[in-house]
Each structure stands twice: as C-alpha cells, then as structure tokens.
Amino acid sequence: MAQGKTVLMALMLVWAGTASAGLFDDEEARKAILDLRQKVEALRNEMDLKIAEEVKRSTEEGAQLRRSLVDLQNQLEVSKAELAKLRGQDEQMARDLADLQRRQKDSAQSLDERLRKFEPARITVDGREISVESAERRDYDAAMAIFRKGEFANAQIAFVDLLNRYPTTGYRPTALFWLGNAQYAIKDYKNALANFRSLIAAAPDHLRVPEAMLAVANCQLELKDVKAARKSLEDLVASFPTSEAAAAAKDRLARFK
C-alpha cells in the first residue's frame, strides 16, 4: 500500500514536472510570438511611414513638376507672344522702310522736277534749237497767247518786256518778228519797221527773215516810201527767190509797173 503510494507520488511528481515544462514552453512561444508580432508591426509601421514619406515626396515632386510644366508653358506662351510681337514689329518696320523709300523717291523726283524748272531747257523755235530758262519760256508763251487773242497793244507791251528782261534770250529773233507784227497791227509802222530790220540784222539766216523783209516793204508802203518799198521787195526776191514771201513780193512789184 505504501509502495503504491510511493509510486503514485512519483508519478504525480513526474507529471507535475512534465506539466511545468509544458507550461514553460508555451509561455516562451507566446513571448516569441508577441515579440515577432511587435517586430512585424514595427516593420509594418516603418514601411507605412516610408511609403507615406515616399508618396508625400512623390506628390511634392509631382506638384513641383506640374508647377515647372505650368511655368514652362507660361514662358512658352510669353515667348510666342514676344515672337509674334517681334514679327509684327519687323513687318511694320518693313512697311515703314518701304514707305520711307517711296517718300524719298517721290521727294527726289519732286526735287528733280523743281530743279528742272530752274534749269535751261533745249527747245526748237522757228527751226532753231535754243536754250531757255523756264521763266523766259513762260513769259514768251504768255506774250504769244496775248498776240493770238488779237490784243496787239498788250502783246506789244509783253514782247518789249520780254526783250528787256532777257536781252540775250534765244527767243529774240522770233520775239522781234511778233513784236513788229503787233506794232504793225496797231499802225505803229515806224517801230514795226525798226524791229523787223533788227531781226534781219541780228539773224540774217533766220526762218522769219523773208517774212520780215516783206513786212519791211509793207511798213514802207504805209509810210508812203514807195521807192524804199520797191527796193526792199527786190532785195527779198533776190535773196530768197523760192520763198512764199518772195512770191508775194513779185506780185507787189508787178503792181508797180
């Protein structure tokens, strides 16, 4: 009985030791598991923090990149606007330059035209080429216009003024001829005779000389100097036998016979 109790106690002690050992092992395992969980949780938290930081950094970098892109786009738009402005300025400058060149050309032409008005011009009068200033040409044309209107007294004044103002004018022989005709028309025969003779003396080869010689004879006839008139007609026929004035002179001479 006692031996049985002893065995029973021994078994109980063995069981208790075994149970105690099992309990120790479970506790260590739980601690290990808890410790592992803590480590996993810490690692997860660390990873979450790193991920959050990386996301934040990426977000900030993305925002900065977007801002940079926006700034770049704005700069590009500004550059486009400035380029368009420069192109517009270039086009305006080109138009201004073309307009300036056109004005300069027009001014040069206008200046040339004004200068030409003061430069002698080469013209042909009664078969002769002469050089005349614009002013004397204007005055001559004005005198001729008055003569053509039949205002012979005024024409006489205009031609006398022309000859006085331009004593060496190339118009002189022609002006003397028309001055003599204007005076003949107003019956100023003496002055007409003097001017016709001045023409003949100054330009004996002038186109108007035959007519002037005939006019001299007409003035002499009006002044009742028949002898001188006959002589003038004979000289005309002798000097210019084929001229129309000579033909008229022949008719006049025939009447004297």
Image (spheres, grey):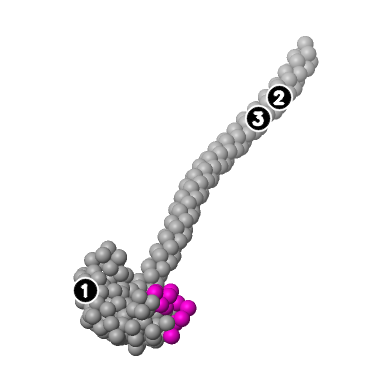
Q: Where is residue 106 in the image (x, y as percent from the top left)?
A: 40, 65
Q: Where is residue 77 in the image (x, y as percent from the top left)?
A: 48, 48
Decide which of tag 1 and tag 3 comes sooner along the chain: 3
Q: Main secondary structure of the magenta part?
A: helix
Badges 1 and 3: C-beta atoms under 8 Å apart?
no
Q: Image point 25% across, 71% down: which residue? A: 185
Looking at numbered disc 1 in the image, what kind of residue is underneath it?
Lys
Looking at numbered disc 3 in the image, what kind of residue is underneath it?
Ile
Q: Image point 68% across, 26% down: which residue? A: 26
Which label was assigned to residue 22? 2
* Stretch of the chain drawn in magenta: 238-252
Q: Which of marks 1 and 3 is in front?
A: 1
User: Helix or strand or loop: what does disc 1 sit on?
Assistant: loop
Q: Is residue 239 found inside the magenta-colored segment of the image?
A: yes
Indicate the quadrant where residue 237 lies.
bottom left
Q: Nearer the viewer, mark 1 or mark 2?
A: 1
Looking at numbered disc 2 in the image, what kind of residue is underneath it?
Gly
User: Helix or strand or loop: what does disc 2 sit on?
Assistant: helix
Estimate the spatial distance between the alpha carbons at disc 2 and disc 3, rounded to whole Å.
16 Å
Tag 1: Cα neighbours inside 10 Å, few (<14), some, or many (≥20)? few
